[in-house]
Amino acid sequence: MARQRLTPNDLDAFWLPFTPNRHFKKEPRLLVRARGLHYYDAKGRALLDACSGLWCVNAGHGRDTIAAAVAEAARELDFAPSFQFAHPDAFHLAQRLTAMAPDGLDHVFFVNSGSEAADSALKLARAYHVKRGEGQRFRLIGRSKGYHGVTFGGLSVGGIANNRKPYGPLLPGTDDHLPLPYDPAHMAFTRGEPQEGASYAQALRDLVNLHGAETIAAVIVEPMAGSAGVFASPSGYLKELRALCDQYGILLIFDEVITGFGRLGFGFAAERYGVTPDIITFAKGVTNGVVPMGGMIVAQTLYDAFMDGPEHSIEFVHGHTYSAHPLACAAALATLDIYRDEDLFARARTLAPVLEEAVHDLKDAPGVIDIRNVGLAAAIDLEPDPKAPGRRGYDVMRRAFHEHDVVVRVSGDTIALAPALVAEAQDIVEMTRRLAAALSQLT
Ligand SMILES: Cc1ncc(COP(=O)(O)O)c(C=O)c1O
């Protein structure tokens, strides 16, 4: 496809998300093509993609069967409303997803992003309690350092201070956050899940004592906090959280936007940890990043609670124009076929020790103060420049791109790696070798 080259003037109009725009426009990082584990720039330079796009391209770039499925859908059924009408692929996809989810999670509600999925789950939780005559359960409890997207609901339960600060009062009933189950003094450089730390879940009991369980609707956590920098759940932590939620009638939501679709070696992290939440939210890997899609997989009990009243009435007053968009459903079905046919979740389990070994080899690189990993995800914390927090992380990411041909994800002074599940062991080693080269230039 012939595309016009961009001139510096052309860079003005697009306001990039989560990006320092002024600096980017002086020194753009433009990607024009992607295949397998690589991005390519306009000059044809190949860059190793060390973060599966943005934690989403789990089956690698440029998968022909997904492209073909999307193209066919665009020709066959470009759009169909999901309000009062539907198309067959949406049902097929919902079935495939419930089959992947733990038993008892039997219904899928589609949206278009992880943020919308989080907001949908929070709304569903409140509405569920209203349905059951317990509308006083309005509190939604997130976790420190949690990331559930950027819309007001997800932001409110989220726990990344910089994301919240500019926006004034957030959603009422969301002020309480559980602590992140991580203590750098004891857990720095842990390999995989910390063995200690299950009791961090008991902080929920304090909130119950403070507010009364009868005011709490739901707890939302990422089974592995991804965006904040790959904080795995300590062994037993999610089980303790589940037990407390059961004891107090609180719904448990797993935000699996990153952990779903093989990142932790299973369809969902719920399976890895043997814990069934009431709602799983998903996005990203469901379509291999090709078409935006998100959603939630919901417990039968929740669904049943809504299926009352006159049959002509809408049970859950919620949805988006593009919920279950035909192109997204086509992309997702083709993606799930790849995950199944290539046994990619098992492959992620095989590759995880390779990543663990490679990333912990960076321990003595300049500025490194912590390294964490779980499944096919890892993060490296750099000692922040006291005068300019975030500068070091940004510099390493830029150098990695411009000088060492590797694309890493950076958030503040934390660098994240999340190779595609189709990577070979040597690709993973090569990613960390290139990152080491960028780290060696740290100032
Ligand atoms: C755990 C989690 N939830 C929600 C989101 C938000 O997803 P989106 O950017 O698609 O809105 C993200 C994005 O990284 C995420 O990691």
Image (cartoon, rainbow, N blue to C red):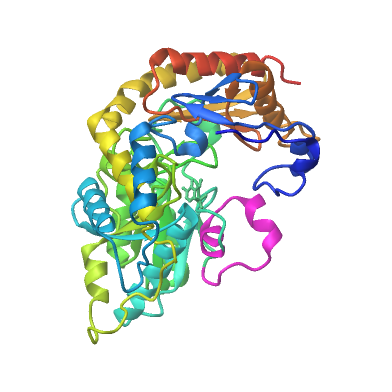
338 on left or right of 363? left
Magenta stretch containing residue 157, yes or no?
A: yes
Q: Answer above or below: position of 205 versus 362.
A: below
Residue plotted at (64% across, 26% down): 42
432 on left or right of 333? right
> Residue 438: image x %, image y %?
65, 18
Along the line of sight, the residue nearer the viewer: 190 or 420: 420
Quadrant in which the N terminus appears: top right
29 on left or right of 46? right
Picture quadrant of residue 198 = top left
Magenta stretch containing residue 163, yes or no?
A: yes
> Residue 324: image x %, image y %?
36, 58
Along the line of sight, the residue nearer the viewer: 238 or 223: 223
Q: Magenta segment, which residues? A: 152-173
Q: Answer above or below: position of 283 versus 265.
A: below
Q: Answer above or below: position of 395 versus 244.
A: above
**Residue 429 in view, yes or no:** yes
Picture quadrant of residue 194 = top left
> Residue 275: image x %, image y %?
27, 48
Q: How many marks?
A: 0
> Residue 180: image x %, image y %?
50, 46
Along the line of sight, the residue nearer the viewer: 175 or 281: 281
Quadrant in which the C terminus appears: top right
103 on left or right of 236? left
Residue plotted at (44% across, 30% down): 61
